[in-house]
Amino acid sequence: MTDLKGREAGFRATTIVDYQLFVTTEPPEVPSSYDLTKMDGVWVAHDRRLPTTKLLDQSRRPFATVFGFAYSEFTSAFLPAGEAELPLEITDIQDIEEKVLPLLSGMFVLLTAEGLPRRIYPDHGGSLPIVFSASDRRAASSPSLLLDETDYRDRFRADLHKALVGREGYGGWISGTLTAHEDVSRLLPNHCLDLSSWTAHRFWPRPGEFSAWRNIDEASSRAAMALRGFSTATCREFNVAATLTAGFDSRLVLASCRESVSRCKFVTIEAPNAEMDIEISRRLARQFGLSHSVLPLKEADNRQMALWDRAVGDCVREQPRRTHPTLRDLTDSDAMFTGMYGEVGRCRLYRQDLLSINQAKIDARFVLDRLTLPAQSDLLENIELWFSGVADQPNSVILDLAFLELKFGSWAMGQRPMTNSIKLNFLPFAQRAVFDAFIGVAPAEKGTGALFRSIIDRLWPELGGAPINKYGDIRDHLTIWKKASDPTRVRRFLRDRLARKDPAGSGGRGHS
């Protein structure tokens, strides 16, 4: 992790620059640990540890450059630094969106080459985050890279920060494309940034993408294959530690690691109320021969929390802000697997009306209610614009995309400038084939765990025998009591459970 004390253009004081990049129309001055790549009038400054790969089609024509760690289903391996030829003919931007991006995953951004519309595409989870200023014609991994000290202060939106971040004890996050700074927007997953107009556009899902539900068996098989391939390749390339809990998400991550379990370590965080996670994880480790450890929670000091705030652009202030130093103790691992995005496949935002959600009337305010976010005026306007881009999709798809993009795409990805500097974070679920299954199987079939069980059965069926999220005795009730004793958890639980199921008369619309 690097604290810059200088004032180089584009790289500002007290900024973490590990595994980040900066895109501008003017050549910036960069730290010595960064490389500078010129691409047809666009300059990309990037941490030298991020591999750079020029993509060629089968006629050896360059069509894009990838910055970062990109797993390719074409070869079942990560792209090499230098050049990589793909067995495709690329003639237009649609070929990249429909033939290339669905088969890449990991932690990267893709910039199209000269001769094609100049665009930036993030990986499916936005794991290498991008924010941008249209007026400055600059993009970067964090607002703290984008703005100098004066702009960072003068463009800071104290009203928005107070309403969305400085609330409810642990804090909150700024959702949608908003950030804590005027004219700095976040590029959400499934969106690209057009560098001619400096505007963002959705490229997936396309209209009508989910007009028919996916077959659960076919979707499970395709997702299982993608998960196995990604996890095996990542464990071959990096020293991986996977988080292990008593929940569904980490169980599916574990199942994806079956072929590489001897090369992967598993870790459970010894956090408050984690007794169940520790006990079941230890049981799994004994039964399946896992290399498992329990990692004591480490609290951040005031300086570390201040550094967090600046690194994430003052956009996120929740529990990880206080606990992020914990993973530094994993000194023999350079990368992490987490179950992030798993809740997309478990109907998280409509579990209370699973069978009726697609007959309800919903709107942007309904989405905010389900995300347990306040209807602050700027945020509501932003989410209304987001909603208009997916309004043709079934309600359940809209809510799955809301969790993917408006929760994880801003809350989780907003943290990545800090967390990537501690350990590289790879997300097995952030793959097109997996998202297609998570979103595209009918709610009645996938339920809140049926799809996960179906995928686990294809990867490592014996894992299904261990309890998930329960002991089966009095300790279940004690765990619930501990959570009920936390006022912040209670407030959020009540907002979640009391979210309007059918806001009739609020301007919503329904799906049959």
Image (cartoon, grey):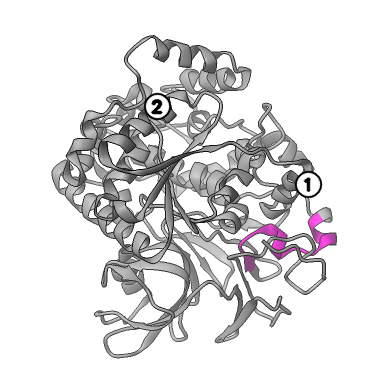
Q: Residue at x 83, y 61 (%)?
A: 149
Q: Residue at x 44, y 32 (%)?
A: 508
Q: Quadrant of the C terminus?
A: top left
Q: Nearer the viewer, mark 1 or mark 2?
A: 2
Q: Please, what is the three-letter code of the amino acid marked with disc 1?
A: Arg
**Residue where numbered disc 1 is placed:** 303
In the picture, residue 340 is in which quadrant? top left
User: In this figure, which residue is indicated by the disc labeled 2?
Assistant: 279
**Helix, strand or loop at mark 2:** helix
User: Which mark is first along the chain, 2 or 1?
Assistant: 2
Left or right for 5, reference 377: right
Q: Position of residue 102 (x, y in %)?
A: 32, 63
- Distance of label 1 from label 2 (alpha carbons): 34 Å
Q: Is residue 67 visible?
A: yes
Q: Is residue 359 left or right of residue 170?
A: left
Left or right of residue 184: residue 152? right
Magenta residue check for 150? yes
Binning the other alpha carbons within 10 Å of mark 1 as few (below 14), some (14 to 19) or many (20 upward) gives few
Mark 2, residues whose alpha carbon is within 10 Å: few (<14), some, or many (≥20)? some
Which residue is painted at 80% across and 63% down in the image?
A: 13
Q: Amino acid at mark 2?
A: Glu
Q: Is residue 97 left or right of residue 108?
A: left
Range of magenta residues: 139-152
- Asked whether 218 or 90 is in front, the reply is 218
Q: Nearer the viewer, residue 153 or 393?
A: 153
